[in-house]
Image (cartoon, helix red, strand yellow):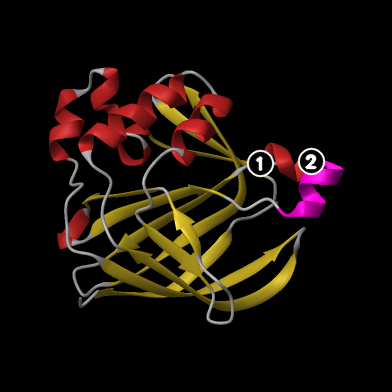
C-alpha cells in the first residue's frame, strides 16, 4: 500500500492569509522583487524511483497581492476550484531540467526569513501526459507541483519539490498530500538575478 506523506505549511506562505483576514501576516509578505533564476541539484529517492538531476526555475515576475487573494479564496473552495484558478493565472516563469522543455509556473511568492534570508514558494499545475489523461491512474488526483525553498543572505539554500501533490485547506493551514513517499530534495540552490 502506498504511504502518503502529509506536510503542513503556513497559509501565509503559499496562498496569503490576507484573504482570510490575517492582516499582520499579509503586511509582512513580500511579493515584489526582481526576476530570478534558481538552480538546484534535485535528488529523488522514493517509491517513484531514485535519480538526481539539475532543475532550473526562472521567476520572471512575482505573484501580485490580488493574485494571492484570488488563489487563497479558490483554495477555500477546494482543489478543483484551485486548479482552475491557478491555470487561469498569467505565468510567473518556467521550470525545467537542462535537457527538457520548460513548463509554466503559475504562482511565485517570497517573504523575509531568518538571518536576512527568505522563504520562496512556487506552485503550478503539473503537465498531464496523454497516457495519464487517457488511462486515469491515481496520479491524476495529484495535479500540483509545489516548490519550497529557504534562501540565505548569500543567495544559496535548500528546499523540496513535491511533484505529484494534492492541496487542501484545513483552517489556517495548507496540507500538501504528496503521491510519493518523500518529496524531491533540492540541494545547493543558487539564486541569481535574471539580466534582461
Q: Position of residue 30 (x, y in %)?
A: 18, 46
Report, in whole angstroms, how far the alpha carbon at label 2 lies from the one at label 1: 8 Å
Q: Secondary structure at mark 2?
A: helix
Q: Position of residue 39 (x, y in %)?
A: 40, 75
Q: Which residue does the numbered mark 1 point to in the structure image?
A: 142
Q: Which residue does the numbered mark 2 point to in the structure image?
A: 138
Provide the residue span drawn in magenta.
129-137
Q: Are marks 2 and 1 in contact (CB under 8 Å)?
A: yes
Q: Nearer the viewer, residue 37 or 182?
A: 37
Q: Secondary structure at mark 1?
A: loop
Residue drawn 68% across the image and 50% down it: 128
User: Does the rendering let one see residue 2?
Assistant: no
Q: Is residue 153 left or right of residue 141?
A: left
For label 2, count other residues whose C-alpha is less than 10 Å away and answer few (under 14), some (14-19) or many (20+).
Answer: few
Q: Quadrant of residue 120?
A: bottom left
Q: Nearer the viewer, residue 86 or 141?
A: 86
Residue drawn 58% across the image and 78% down it: 53
Q: Is residue 159 left or right of residue 164?
A: left
**Placement of the C terminus among the 4 image quadrants:** bottom left
Amino acid at each position: 500500500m502506498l504511504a502518503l506523506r502529509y506536510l503542513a505549511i503556513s497559509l501565509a506562505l503559499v496562498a496569503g492569509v490576507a484573504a482570510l483576514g490575517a492582516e499582520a501576516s499579509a503586511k509582512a509578505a513580500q511579493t515584489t522583487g526582481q526576476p530570478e533564476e534558481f538552480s538546484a541539484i534535485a535528488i529523488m529517492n522514493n517509491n517513484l524511483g531514485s535519480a538526481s538531476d539539475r532543475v532550473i526555475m526562472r521567476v520572471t515576475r512575482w505573484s501580485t497581492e490580488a493574485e494571492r487573494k484570488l488563489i487563497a479564496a479558490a483554495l477555500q473552495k477546494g482543489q478543483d476550484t484551485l486548479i482552475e484558478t491557478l491555470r487561469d493565472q498569467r505565468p510567473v516563469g518556467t521550470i525545467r531540467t537542462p535537457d527538457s522543455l520548460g513548463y509554466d509556473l503559475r504562482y511565485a511568492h517570497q517573504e523575509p526569513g531568518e538571518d536576512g534570508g527568505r522563504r520562496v514558494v512556487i506552485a503550478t499545475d503539473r503537465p498531464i501526459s496523454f497516457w495519464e489523461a487517457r488511462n486515469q491512474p491515481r496520479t491524476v488526483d495529484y495535479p500540483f507541483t509545489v516548490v519550497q525553498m529557504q534562501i540565505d543572505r548569500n543567495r544559496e539554500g535548500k528546499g523540496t519539490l513535491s511533484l505529484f501533490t494534492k492541496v487542501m485547506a484545513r483552517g489556517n493551514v495548507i496540507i500538501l498530500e504528496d503521491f510519493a513517499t518523500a518529496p524531491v530534495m533540492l540541494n545547493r540552490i543558487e539564486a541569481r538575478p535574471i539580466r534582461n
